[in-house]
Amino acid sequence: MPYKKLTFFLLIFSAIFFSGKVFASQENVDLYLFSAEGCAHCRDEKVFLEKMEDKYENISVYEFEITKSEKNRRIFQETLEKLGTKSNGVPFTVIGDKYFIGFGSEETTGKLIEEAILDEISNGKNGFQDMGKIDLPILGEVDAKKMSLPVLTVIVGGLDGFNPCAMWVLVFLIGLLLGMKDRKRMWIFGSAFIISSSLVYFLFMSAWLNLFLFLGVILWVRLIIAGVAFFSGGYYLRDFYVNKEGECKVEGGGKKKKVFEKLREIIHERNFFLALAGIIMLAFAVNLVELICSAGLPAVYTQVLALSNLPAWQYYAYIFLYVFFFMLDDLAVFVLAMITLKHIGISGKYSRYSRLIGGILMLILGYLLIFHPQWLMFG
């Protein structure tokens, strides 16, 4: 595309996003489509937009293909900044001050795009942006379209938490703590271990998220993560049938013995602060190793999170929610053990069946990442 035409479009974008309207006074609607070569949903939307051009005479569609043109990518990034969004998903459609990420079908996304076109033509507000909002007692107004992501976060985080590799060190630590006479020290050491483990997981998932946000919605990245989802799903299902006891297979018996001996030394350390520092360092070290056992679920989840159009703070709020439910079973086991002074553990069958559910969920997410990524673009 000639440079002058690109410059002209850039000036149009500036006028659009600073004014918030697309030449409404002239009853003309300019629609901007950012697409990528090889994107099936982009092709579907272009077919739909051709129908809209035939149906409405005053529509002009401008397409920017971003995989081959550096200038188009720069315009795309400037457009995202002016709209106040960080999502790099395509197809990305802009009509006035409204934008749409992805394209499901003519009956879903297409209907919303057409309503936005009619809204611009009439220079009025039809209120379609408020569709899906409901008033709930106590909670107030809730956008039902955004409820799927919290549900997915709770489910995946909870399933990840039942990973047997995430529990064995805590269970042994509780056994050592129950032999102590100082209740206050018991609570502090156990809490320090859980908080440190949570922090490791939070940092790990934040790193995944920032990597995906940095790379953007690139086809090959999405396909790789879909491959990770399929591999992890198959591994979890195989583990469900093979590993009847629901035990962790990553850590060998020799390594576990070394960890147990180190824990015993730390717990019996007379200096409180040295013991506390030892607990924190051991939690970091053990959880970094255990990430090998459960890297699939958080990697796939953070890819889904990166596809969503959210403010920066909400990304980390969802990771925090994920980590909370990931650690919830550990927290419950620890608190009950400290209150009852009895050794409590979770049966291996819960870990085993979490593998079954997690495996099925991973296969579903892998399929959606390849064939219907727009279904995973929440918010």
Image: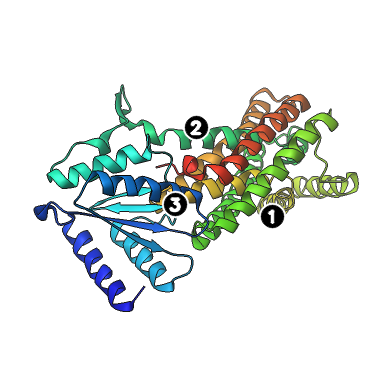
Could you classify mark 3 by the number of other residues whose Cα lies within 10 Å: few (under 14), some (14-19), or many (20 or more)?
Answer: many
Residue sitting at 89 percent across and 44 percent down?
253
Residue sitting at the far left: 25
Q: Which picture quadrant has residue 20?
A: bottom left
Residue 324 makes an appearance in the image: yes
Mark 2 packing: few (<14 Cα in 10 Å), some, or many (20+)? Answer: few
236 relative position to 327: left or right: right
Question: Mark 2 near mark 1, Cβ–Cβ under 8 Å?
Answer: no
Q: Residue at x 39, y 68 (%)?
A: 72
Disc 2 target residue: 151
Q: Position of residue 75 (x, y in %)?
A: 35, 67
Residue 42 marker: 3
Which residue appears farthest toward the right when viewing the image?
Answer: 254
Q: Which of these two is toward me, 315 or 127?
A: 127
Q: Secondary structure at mark 3?
A: helix
| Relative depth, front residue between 62 and 270 | 62
Residue type for callout 3? Cys
What's the image's color scheme?
Answer: rainbow
